Amino acid sequence: MKRKHWLWVAAIIAVLLVGAFTWTVLHPAEGSRGVLYRVNDGKNEMYLLGSIHIGSSAMYPFGEDIRQAMAKADTFVYECDTAAADAVADMRQRMALSEGETLSSLLGETLYAELTQVCQKLDIDMSTINKLKPWAVVNTLAVYTTSVEIGASNVNNALALGVEKQVQAYAEANHKNTAYLETLTEQVSVLEGFSDALQHYLLQGVCDVILNPDSANKGMDTTIAQWPDWWRTGDAEAFANAYLSTYLEPGHEVVCAEYHRKLITQRNAHMAEGLVKLLESGDTCFVTVGLLHLALPEDSIVKLLRDRGYTVEQLSIP
């Protein structure tokens, strides 16, 4: 069964806490265009950069448009503060199974057996996984699947080369202000709201990729290796077309539509409201959010802002 494993990564929640990657410019190249937009309301402006949470060295350094936009910004804005101590403690509590629940009973014998094989292959302690709810297991393992598909040999390095990590390193080095569009609690609530069918679908996809990387890397999945190049050249349309042409997997349309609605459409509306407030505050903001929140033509943050009368132009057209 072919599954669109990249769905989870479209707006993956970055709950794995890793150290900031030191900002470096290693290559004397022109630099990446990225997927970059400028928003203007006639008085104030804002920059939106689409992020890939798992990256490669081929995506760096940033090109001139991105560097200039970052230099202009007063405040750097991200999807969520994943390091706030109280929110992290709440998240960990909500990830845990309730007393009397077992992961094996929730997943069923076949899927649980596959998950056990996955943990053995990745050298992950199954006793830790057994304490988690299905959505939390998916979230924990999803980074491994994307690393496999993007061709990364080291998960931590791939995370550190994600766009948001690189932007954060620049902002910290230059002592920029920070703001967030969502709380960690809000993001966890989205994941908790996934139906059992969607959680099982996503976990099955994770297991398929990790246990059978060669056979799983077909169809839509083959494009994941192209993400760094698409991002480097600013080809937002390639991302959008690839996603829209395949995200409704035949036989699984209901759960795929649920995924899109809850993790993209509904969150886009919420984040657009936050961006309007930031734009009207007068600060010049540099905003980094998951790429598909910006690139999709029908329900993206970009379209929502344009519908409200703001001028939004893509600066990174190939």
Image (tube, grey):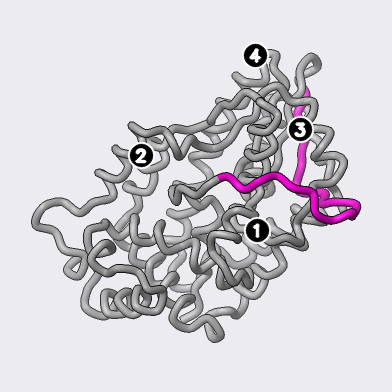
Badge 3 crowding class, 10 Å Cα cut-off, few under 14, some 14 to 19, many 20 or more, is many
Is residue 299 in sight in this rendering?
A: no
Please give the range of residues in magenta: 20-40
Give the structural element (helix, strand or loop) at label 1. loop
Q: Give the camera-side residue of 46 and 171.
A: 171
Q: Give the camera-side residue of 218 and 84.
A: 84
Residue at (63% x, 60% y) in the render: 244
Using the image, tell me which numbered label, if any, was put on residue 55. 1
Q: Earlier in the sequence, mark 4 or mark 3?
A: 3
- Residue 78 place in picture, x, y as percent: 58, 35
Q: What is the C-alpha distance between the residues marked 3 and 1?
A: 19 Å
Using the image, tell me which numbered label, if any, was put on residue 281. 4
Badge 4 crowding class, 10 Å Cα cut-off, few under 14, some 14 to 19, many 20 or more, is few
Q: Earlier in the sequence, mark 4 or mark 2?
A: 2
- The residue that mark 2 highlights is 88
- The residue that mark 3 highlights is 70
Q: What is the C-alpha distance between the residues marked 2 and 3?
A: 28 Å
**Left or right of residue 159: residue 212:** left
> Looking at the image, which residue sits at the far bottom?
215
Kindly identify the amino acid type of the residue bearing the numbered disc 3: Met
Q: What is the C-alpha distance between the residues marked 4 and 3?
A: 18 Å
Kindly identify the amino acid type of the residue bearing the numbered disc 2: Val
Q: Earlier in the sequence, mark 3 or mark 1?
A: 1
Q: Earlier in the sequence, mark 1 or mark 2?
A: 1
Kindly identify the amino acid type of the residue bearing the numbered disc 4: Ser
Give the structural element (helix, strand or loop) at label 3. helix
Q: Mark 4 or mark 2: which is in front? A: 2
* Residue 25 colored in magenta in the image: yes
- Residue 56 place in picture, x, y as percent: 68, 61
Residue at (26% x, 62% y) in the render: 128
- Residue 257 place in picture, x, y as percent: 47, 56
Q: Give the camera-side residue of 314 and 139.
A: 139
